[in-house]
Amino acid sequence: MKIRVLGCAGALAAGYRTTSFLLDDDVLIDAGSGVAELTVEAMAKVDHILVTHSHLDHVLAIGLLADTVQRRRAQAGRPPVKVHALRETLEALRAHVFNGVIWPDFTRLPSSDRPALTFHEFAVGDRLDLGDGRRIEVLSAAHTVPAVGFAVDGGASGHWVFTGDTGPNPALWQRLSEIKVAHLIIECAFGDDECGLAGISKHLCPTTLRDELAKLGGSIDVHITHIKPGERDAVMEAVMALRTTHRLSALENFQEFSLT
């Protein structure tokens, strides 16, 4: 299995795209503006989209992808793209995105019996089997809307874990203590000068990131994501100054992870 970073910024600017990861060539984990890094041919191969939560920077490309590939996939006899998320997230997408006002309802188009998208509900703790030995566990997250993270099972090499958007979350660390973690993708959306805002919006800043990482034993490769354009240097300077047993680095666009 391979995971490629398509976007990992907390907002938009030239050279920055919001959260999306490509697992092999047919599974998206979140669908932010990073999806635009894919060619039309690559987009048409996507069979599954796993969504952490309903915020725009994580879902904005779902409808655009559907519009781009629905004709091509139908002509090739491909099934609808499956969108997997919490019940509350799917309800938000139906009510606020695929409502015929913001965007056409591609769960009913081009026809109700052969739509471009189908919605599939999961819950925290579920283990999704996406074929070819790919198993993904749905993890707890603590955000301003119902949210999750994901742990991709890499077998003997350990799990690739993405926290999604989250503030402090004891349930996450309890679960991670029970599995082997090879890579941890964790957000740090604000600098320490905005820790108050991070708390209100249920994100992390370097100080709270330090406290959270202290709950994870061992020495893990930790990759920092969701930093806003223009604030990366300041945030990462504070992150790299943290005292921790873990190996810290900034997540990079187009970075690839191999799980065997």
Image (cartoon, rainbow, N blue to C red):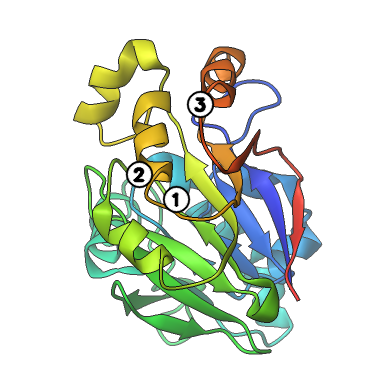
Q: Are marks 2 and 3 in contact (CB under 8 Å)?
A: no
Q: In which quarter of the image is residue 141?
A: bottom left
Q: Between residues 237 and 25, which one lies in front from this camera angle?
A: 237
Q: Where is residue 191 in the image (x, y as percent from the top left)?
A: 42, 17
Mark 3 is on which residue type? Leu
Q: Is residue 150 left or right of residue 74?
A: left
Per the image, label 2 sits on a secondary structure element best described as: loop
Q: Do the residues labelled 2 and 1 touch (CB within 8 Å)?
A: yes
Residue assigned mark 3: 242
- Please report the residue visible at 46 percent of the width from the left and 82 percent of the height from the top: 128
Q: Quadrant of residue 81?
A: bottom right
- Is the residue 251 above or below the residue 125 in the image? above
Separation of disc 2 and disc 3 at Cα?
Answer: 29 Å
Q: Position of residue 5 (x, y in %)?
A: 68, 49
Q: In this view, does 132 lie to the left or right of 160?
A: right
Number of numbered discs visible in the structure rendering: 3
Q: Quadrant for the C terminus, please.
A: bottom right
Q: Between residues 61 and 54, which one lies in front from this camera angle?
A: 54
- Please report the residue visible at 24 percent of the width from the left and 69 percent of the height from the top: 87
Residue assigned mark 2: 55
Separation of disc 1 and disc 3 at Cα?
Answer: 32 Å
Q: Where is residue 151 in the image (x, y as percent from the top left)?
A: 50, 67
- Is the residue 187 above or below the residue 126 in the image? above
- Is the residue 16 above or below the residue 258 in the image? above
Mark 1 is on which residue type? Val
| Rendered image: mark on residue 59 | 1
Q: Quadrant for the N terminus, please.
A: bottom right
